[in-house]
Image (spheres, coloured by chain):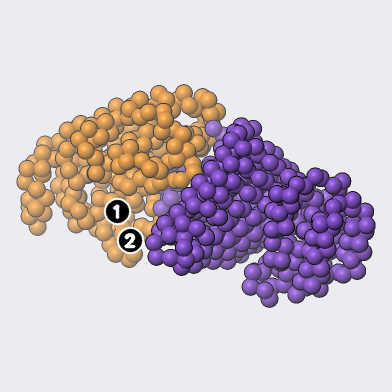
């Protein structure tokens, strides 16, 4: 088991948002977590990534059998956890290539593997950029600064491609994308899918799942998983709306 | 007013004049300046402009002053500019002019100079240095000058820049004096019609440093960039006082100063932008952002706009703060330990100013300096 969330209660500013969430993810699987606004989707992503403003009230999160909540956000990352942000942050003055090489080398160092010098890394980065059809001119630009919404999301997936996480959580990666950008981003993610990793797609809409077919669909409502099923569940949700699930679980 | 060690400088100035083989007008000017210095003394914290900068550590030392240099030829035009230098702004400026050693740079009309012109000044321990540079960028010229300060002693500089009609002058000022050094400098700039003055003032060194920069639009259509960066640590103190004076219509000024302060360092930014009564069509923006890396660091910032005309576009602002938590979290989620993440973001903050430098050798040198000071290892 790669990730096991057990009876997780968590929230922000003293307000409980996740109210007993359970989730099990194995390597090689793609899970979709769907839910209406305010159901706790983003809270789950942020708690798993270790956002300091979020507080875990009770429950347990095991990652590769170890207590994930004991780890700092950067330790989680070096251990192979990745979150693609719903709103990627701009880092002025730091170029994409500088940033990615630092991140990559921190991970390599942590695993006792060889770090790459700027030239080696540049070649590596060029290869990875093809996955999301990103022009090398973006490497020199400051991280996310002045990027369009679609470019920011592509950049998140490029980071995922570079860091090769064991578990990637994509927090509403489809939000704010037009259909072409969505296709590029989703196809990029699908190319990164492998039997060695797992992906959690956190999304409001079904449309992302046309490109990345999930193994399991979970419906999150009121801070809990209220329904689980195969990929057909997403289509059913799309057709009937979230009220159907809410009504069915009352 | 801090009393001047009269005896020391009186006899030093007397000797200086006696040895000088300069023209009489210049000796007269020096006498006037020295009289002003004797009267004013070193600036005291009781004066508004020196409220946050205590010059006493500089005043307490009996600096040895240089001997007069062999006289340079100064034509009537340059003489007029020289006489214009505002040595009465404070005791340092007066002292400066009394002992100033002059360099004149004339950038010929309608000529582009591709190689940057390098002016480098190094003070030695216990000694004072008084470089005075007059730059005349003649009409239609285009050039870049680099003004650098090094050394362990006391530098008290004065730079006068005249950017004539349709000339473009890029000016980099890099103050990297030793950590025990003192630095006081004045820059006075006048812009002609349709001219561009683009300056970047980097303050990294010195125990106490003070820079006064006055930029004046004398004819329409001028554009000035007056940007700066200070990266300080230990107990360093850096003070910038700037005046941007829109005296005529349709000029544009941009000011962006950034400060990064660690340990117990302290910075002062006082930026006045004047938009005079007839300066309609003025476009002025001013910003001073500061990052405090330690609870003991301190910034006193005062951006001021004084507008006497309605037909203008002006903005100003200042911030003093820590790194954004969201940025820090983002960088950490990519595997960078907290300390590295903080240093990287701080470097990025400073880079906005360094990145505008168009001369690679200087940009790389400053990059390296800032990275070293922040302990970040980055190449590429």
Q: Residue A134: percent from the left, percent from the top?
A: 35, 29
Q: Is residue B142 left or right of residue B237?
A: left
Disc 1 element: helix
Q: Nearer the viewer, residue A145 or B282?
A: B282
Above or below, A164 against B93 in this view is: above
Q: Identify which residue is drawn at 75% across, 47% down.
A: B75
Q: Residue B318: percent from the left, percent from the top?
A: 49, 62
Q: Residue B155: percent from the left, percent from the top?
A: 76, 54
Q: Colour of chain A?
A: orange
Q: Colour of chain B?
A: purple
Above or below, B134 against B236 in this view is: above
Q: Identify which residue is drawn at 73% across, 69% down.
A: B43
Q: Quadrant of the C terminus of chain B?
A: top right
Q: Nearer the viewer, residue A89 or B300?
A: B300
Subunit bearing disc 2:
A
Q: Dots 2 and 1: beta carbons under 8 Å?
A: yes
Disc 2 element: strand
User: Would you name the residue on which mark 2 appears?
Assistant: A12
Q: Is residue A32 left or right of residue B78?
A: left
Q: Residues within 10 Å of mark 2 (few under 14, many from 20)?
A: some
Q: Identify which residue is drawn at 87% across, 46% down.
A: B70
Sooner in the amino-acid sequence: mark 2 or mark 1 = 2
Q: Using the image, tell me which numbered label, if any, was put on residue B139.
A: none
Q: Residue furthest front?
A: B76
- Asked whether residue A233 appears in the rendered view, the answer is no
User: Would you name the residue on which mark 1 appears?
Assistant: A43
**How far, Cα to Cα, is label 2 from label 1?**
8 Å
Q: Identify which residue is drawn at 67% across, 46% down.
A: B135
Q: Quadrant of the N terminus of chain B?
A: bottom right
């Amino acid at each position: 088991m790669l990730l096991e969330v057990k009876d997780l209660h968590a929230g922000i500013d003293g307000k409980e948002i996740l109210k007993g969430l359970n989730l099990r993810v194995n390597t090689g699987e793609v899970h979709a977590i769907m839910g209406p606004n305010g159901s706790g989707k983003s809270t789950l992503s942020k708690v798993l990534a270790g956002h300091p403003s979020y507080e875990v009230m009770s429950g347990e999160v095991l990652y590769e059998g170890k207590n994930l909540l004991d780890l700092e956000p950067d330790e989680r990352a070096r251990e192979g956890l990745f979150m693609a942000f719903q709103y990627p942050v701009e880092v002025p003055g730091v170029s994409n290539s500088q940033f990615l090489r630092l991140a990559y080398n921190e991970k390599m160092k942590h695993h006792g593997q060889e770090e790459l010098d700027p030239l080696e890394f540049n070649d590596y980065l060029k290869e990875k950029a093809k996955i999301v059809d990103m022009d090398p001119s973006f490497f020199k630009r400051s991280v996310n600064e002045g990027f369009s919404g679609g470019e920011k999301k592509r950049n998140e997936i490029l980071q995922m491609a570079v860091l090769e996480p064991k578990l990637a959580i994509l927090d509403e990666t489809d939000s704010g994308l037009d259909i072409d950008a969505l296709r590029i981003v989703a196809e990029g993610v699908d190319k990164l899918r492998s039997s060695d990793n797992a992906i959690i797609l956190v999304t409001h809409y079904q449309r992302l799942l046309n490109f990345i077919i999930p193994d399991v669909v979970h419906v999150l409502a009121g801070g809990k998983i209220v329904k689980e099923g195969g990929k057909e569940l997403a289509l059913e949700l799309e057709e009937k709306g979230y009220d159907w699930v809410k009504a069915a679980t009352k | 007013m801090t009393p001047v060690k009269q005896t020391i400088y009186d006899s030093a100035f007397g000797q200086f004049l006696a040895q000088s083989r300069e023209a009489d007008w210049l000796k007269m000017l020096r006498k006037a300046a020295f009289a002003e210095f004797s009267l004013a003394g070193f600036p005291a914290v009781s004066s508004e402009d020196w409220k946050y900068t205590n010059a006493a550590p500089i005043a307490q030392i009996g600096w040895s002053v240089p001997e007069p240099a062999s006289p340079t030829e100064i034509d009537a035009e340059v003489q007029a500019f020289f006489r214009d230098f505002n040595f009465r702004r404070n005791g340092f400026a007066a002292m400066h002019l009394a002992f100033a050693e002059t360099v004149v740079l004339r950038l010929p009309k309608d000529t582009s100079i591709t190689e940057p012109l390098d002016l480098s000044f190094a003070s030695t321990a216990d000694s004072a240095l008084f470089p005075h540079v007059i730059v005349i960028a003649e009409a239609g010229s285009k050039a870049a000058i680099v003004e650098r300060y090094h050394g362990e002693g006391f530098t008290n500089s004065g730079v006068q820049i005249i950017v004539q009609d349709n000339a473009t002058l890029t000016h980099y000022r890099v103050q990297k004096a030793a950590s025990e050094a003192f630095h006081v400098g004045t820059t006075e700039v006048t812009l002609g019609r349709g001219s561009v003055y683009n300056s970047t003032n980097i303050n990294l060194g010195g125990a106490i440093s003070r820079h006064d920069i006055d930029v004046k639009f004398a004819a329409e259509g001028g554009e000035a960039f007056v940007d700066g960066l200070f990266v300080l640590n230990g107990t360093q103190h850096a003070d910038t006082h700037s005046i941007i004076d829109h005296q005529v219509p349709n000029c544009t000024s941009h000011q962006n100063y950034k400060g990064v302060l660690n340990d117990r360092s302290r910075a002062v930014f006082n930026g006045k932008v004047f938009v005079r009564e007839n300066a309609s069509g003025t476009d002025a923006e001013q910003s001073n952002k500061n990052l405090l890396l330690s609870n003991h660091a301190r910034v006193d910032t005062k951006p001021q706009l004084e507008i006497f005309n309605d037909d203008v576009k002006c903005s100003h602002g200042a911030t003093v703060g820590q790194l954004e938590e969201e940025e820090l979290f983002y960088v950490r989620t990519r595997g960078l330990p907290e300390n590295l993440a903080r240093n990287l973001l701080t470097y990025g903050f400073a880079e906005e100013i360094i990145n505008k430098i168009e001369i690679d050798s200087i940009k790389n040198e400053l990059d390296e300096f800032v990275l070293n000071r922040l302990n970040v290892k980055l190449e590429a």
